[in-house]
Image (cartoon, rainbow, N blue to C red):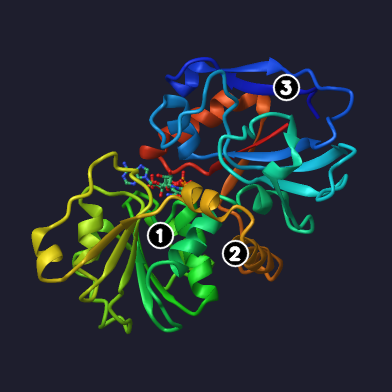
Amino acid sequence: KTSACQLIFYKYGDPTKVVEKETLILPAKPQPHEVIVEMLASPVNPGDINTIQGVYGVKPSLPSTPGNEGVGKVSQVGSAVMNLKVGDWVLPKNNGWGTWRSHVVSSSDDLIRIANDIPVASAATMAANPCTAYRLLHDFVNVKPGDSIIQNGANSSVGQAVIQVARYFGLKTINIVRDRPDIKSLKDQLYELGADHVVTEEELKSFDVEKNGLKLPLLGFDCVAGKSGANMLRKMDHNPTLITYGGMSKQPLVVPVSALIFQNANFHGFWMSRWNRANDDSKERRDTMECLVDMVRKGSLVPPVHEIVHIDMYKDAIKKTMSSGNTTCPKQILVF
Ligand code: NDP
């Protein structure tokens, strides 16, 4: 266990260069409405990289501690705090809270309690990706058991969560990944999670949805943008809805005119952070978390393939996450 420390950046820029590690001075006890949280695990997500680069949807004021999700344990509670007690596991309610540090002094209102009988890696990675998967499957098209959905970037952490949440609700998934030398082992890994079909971008061209016993999907999830989103539309029904939630190709979404006019395709974006702010402590938010925690307990939702990295090695974790455009990288999870 490390002594109190935090990662911090004083200017936007290359995450491998601008992020520094500093010692953290903690107060002897928290203010009445505050708690002290001992962080247990914090993932390195693409959104964190973009935040440090200064190209994310929100730009924190500087200096700032990166890390938008993670799980911590309450170690001290202020005298007026009613909603939390020592030993509770907590997640930040909104992004920008700064999870890449060993301890956080926080208003108790900025935290949500999460069950502490699930694996740390599941709790640490719950707020961004499985919650996104759950909302993508519930908020746009009224899909029913037996319906199919299609997604690209299917091996991303969000994609792995989509496969598992979709299966839990009786939906079939068509999953698109990029080709690679060891494609079979990647496909097997996604089949293991419950994927119905896994195809490469190239194989998708000749993939016949109905001949494979599936209904044409009305709902598609786009992690990649560029041409990949349009390729999915070719395998979807009339009046489909395509939701872009990531832009991993760094290319604009290409939308064929025929899809707009003849297929009557609908396009949406989704941002979990916006949903969280709009839903603060809502029943929907609590229900979402409860369902996902329940799935973890039943073994229906496992964390993404990951690697535990001590905070001293944070530069390696950042580098690996940034190079995932070329090589598949397990989700890097910082511990302290
Ligand atoms: P991961 O790091 O787990 O996975 C990254 C994925 O992107 C892999 O599937 C990888 O595939 C793929 N990828 C990387 N580079 C490219 C490329 N050039 N072209 C096509 N695919 C590529 O990421 P997360 O699951 O944590 O996040 C995925 C995306 O979702 C990010 O853009 C993230 O910002 C976004 N996101 C959005 C949310 C929202 O609310 N809108 C919430 C959570 C995440 P390969 O193995 O082939 O490299």
Separation of marks 1 and 3 at Cα, in angstroms: 41 Å
- Marking on residue 288: 2
- Classify residue 228 by image quadrant: bottom left
Q: Is residue 26 above or below residue 184?
A: above
**Where is mark 1, residue-wise?**
184
Q: Mark 2 packing: few (<14 Cα in 10 Å), some, or many (20+)?
A: some
Residue for badge 3: 5
Q: Nearer the viewer, residue 144 or 333?
A: 144
The span from disc 2 to disc 3 (Cα, nearest Å) is 32 Å
Picture residue at 43% right of the left edge, 82% below the top: 144
The residue under label 1 is which amino acid type? Lys
Residue 44 in the image: above or below residue 205: above
* Residue type highlighted by circle 2: Thr
Tell me: 336 left or right of 146: right
First reached walking from the N terminus: tag 2 or tag 1: 1
* Residue mark closest to the camera, 1 vs 3: 3
Which residue is at a point 52% across and 77% down the rendered structure image? Answer: 169
Label 2 SS: helix
Disc 1 is placed on an element classified as helix
What is the CA distance from the residue labelled 2 to the residue labelled 1? 33 Å
Q: Which tag is nearer the camera, tag 2 or tag 3?
A: 2
Looking at the picture, how far across and down is residue 258, in whole percent? 9, 64
Using the image, determine if residue 58 lies above or below residue 205: above
| Label 3: which secondary element | strand
Residue nearest the observer in this picture, 91 or 204: 91
Q: Amino acid at mark 3?
A: Cys
Place of residue 303 in the rendered image (x, y in percent of width and height, measured from the top left): 60, 55
Q: Is residue 194 visible?
A: no
> Position of 102 compared to 185: left or right?
right
